[in-house]
Image (spheres, rainbow, N blue to C red):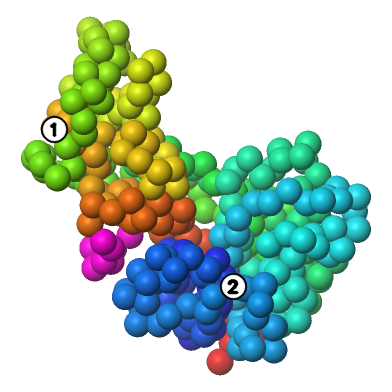
Amino acid sequence: MFKFIDLFAGIGGFRIAFEEAGGQCVFSSEIDSHAKEVYEKNFKDEPYGDITKIPSSNIPDHDVLCAGFPCQPFSIGGYRKGFEDTRGTLFFEIARIIRDKQPSAIILENVSGITSHDHGKTIDTIMNTLDELGYHAEFKIMNAKDYGVPQNRNRWYCVGFKKGLGVLFNQSPKKPDNSSQLIFEFPNTKELEFTLNEIISDKEIKEYEVSQKAQENIEKFLEEFKGSDKYNDDYPIIANNIRPSRCHLSSTGISPCLTAKMGTGGNNIPVVVKHKRKLTEKECLKLMGFPEWFDIKPNNQQSYKQIGNSVVVPVISSLATRIAEVLQKTKLLV
């Protein structure tokens, strides 16, 4: 068993994945009171609050630091001052804890746009900071639909190990010195493990019905697609952003990206066209790879927001398993 901490924990996607990989969560932190409530309900463990107010000395020692942190502009980012460049951002809190606690490994998640944010200065600052703190880190953009989950969700994943462990990455230009060299490999793409047909309930659910106006907008929009190769009755038709001239359509068996904007109103929640209703929270959770036992409030805007803010559990699991395997080989863990 290894120990990990869950920063910017949300509703616990990282925790599910790392516990499945054999880890023990020894600390979690989340500032949103609604997300904390869901987290405590499912894990019987209330996260600490604002990480900016928690001294490193109050955080237990751990082997892996997990953080799906919000992306904020760096006020002086990109000037290669490493740790100093991150002050005033939430990434600084991650860097502070890494510096003070020195975990063996880290895993970070963010939107894919972080790589181009501020003309690349933000990602340069993050990677320079991790290097300065003594970590060899690499990142990869991974789309959930390419890793077994039918959702078009592109995200940035960064994995790092303390340099003293001597871990190399499969995408690193440096070749192993010998056959016993520790290698971390980002997972290869794979086929879908389940489909939209298996996720979406084939029934009408009155409390999830969209407005009459939204239904009219959908029908008007679909007229343009019927009879074309973009319209496929073999798949559930999913539409989102149902407003005049702003409909989007998925008829490929892949869901559009679920975002936190789902919590800002029904127009942003994907709609099952056949039944003229929103996806339920349970259906959305399945599109994020959450297990059946996970419990969240039904028909609740905060629940949609929390799901859209979360991580795709199977993608994190594929990384967590590989991190655990590398750490096991280092023989540093009890």
Image: magenta residue range: 290-297
Name above or below for residue 45 compared with residue 309.
Answer: below
| Mark 1, secondary structure of its residue | helix
Residue 292 painted magenta: yes
* Residue 174, position as x, y percentages in the image: 79, 55
Q: Which residue is mark 2?
A: 50
Asked if residue 158 lies left or right of residue 297, the reply is right
Left or right: residue 8 versus residue 242 is: right
State the SS at label 2. Answer: loop
- Report x, y in % for residue 306: 40, 56
What residue is drawn where x is 18% and y is 26%?
212
Along the line of sight, which residue is nearer the eye, 264 or 291?
A: 264
How far apart, in angstroms, are the residues tagged by discs 1 and 2?
A: 41 Å
Q: Residue furthest bottom?
A: 334
Please provide percent x and percent y for residue 156. Answer: 59, 49
Q: Is label 1 or label 2 in front?
A: 2
- Residue at coordinates 64% horizontally, 51% vertically from top-left? 71
The residue that label 1 is drawn on is 275
Three-letter code for the amino acid on which mark 2 is drawn = Asp
Q: Quadrant of residue 49?
A: bottom right
